[in-house]
Amino acid sequence: MEKTEHELLKEANDLLRSFHSVCDRKGVSTNWDPLLLNLKRVLKEQHQYLYPTVKQLRLKKLNKINEQNSE
């Protein structure tokens, strides 16, 4: 399921807030592995949203056509 713009923005904001907390603590008491995994995931999703490939654009267009035809 594709995420909405609101969901993508919320995840990015949550990640920024987490990183802000890390900066406030100067990195002390930070569970780095989950933070980095979350960062990689959010960046990948943001990149896919901001820079869709031609294949993704075609798939979206095809899905939209199929939805219109099924109505």
Image (cartoon, rainbow, N blue to C red):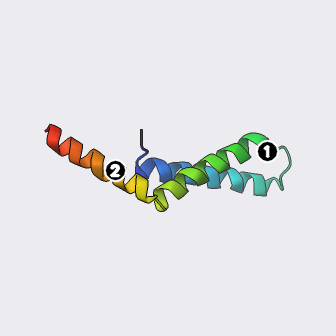
Q: Which residue is drawn at 54% across and 50% down?
A: 45
Q: Residue at x 81, y 44 (%)?
A: 30
**How crowded is the residue under tag 2: few (<14 C-alpha within 10 Å), some, or many (20+)?**
few
Which label is found at residue 32?
1
Could you tell whether 54 is left or right of 16 in the image? left
Q: Which residue is drawn at 70% across and 54% down?
A: 19
Q: Which residue is drawn at 59% across and 50% down?
A: 42
Label 1 residue SS: helix
Ranked by sequence position, the earlier of labels 1 and 2 is 1
* Residue 51 x %, y %: 48, 62
* Residue 6 x %, y %: 42, 51
Label 2 residue SS: helix
Give the spatial CA distance, label 1 vs label 2.
Answer: 36 Å
The quadrant in which residue 69 appears is top left
* Residue 1 x %, y %: 42, 38
Q: Which of 12 and 65 is in front in this view?
A: 65
Q: Nearer the viewer, residue 39 or 63?
A: 63
Could you tell whether 32 is left or right of 20 in the image? right
Which label is found at residue 16?
none
Could you tell whether 25 is left or right of 45 in the image? right
Could you tell whether 2 is left or right of 40 in the image? left
Q: Name the residue under label 2.
A: 60
In the depicted structure, whether residue 3 falls above or below residue 54: above
> At label 1, which amino acid type do we have?
Trp
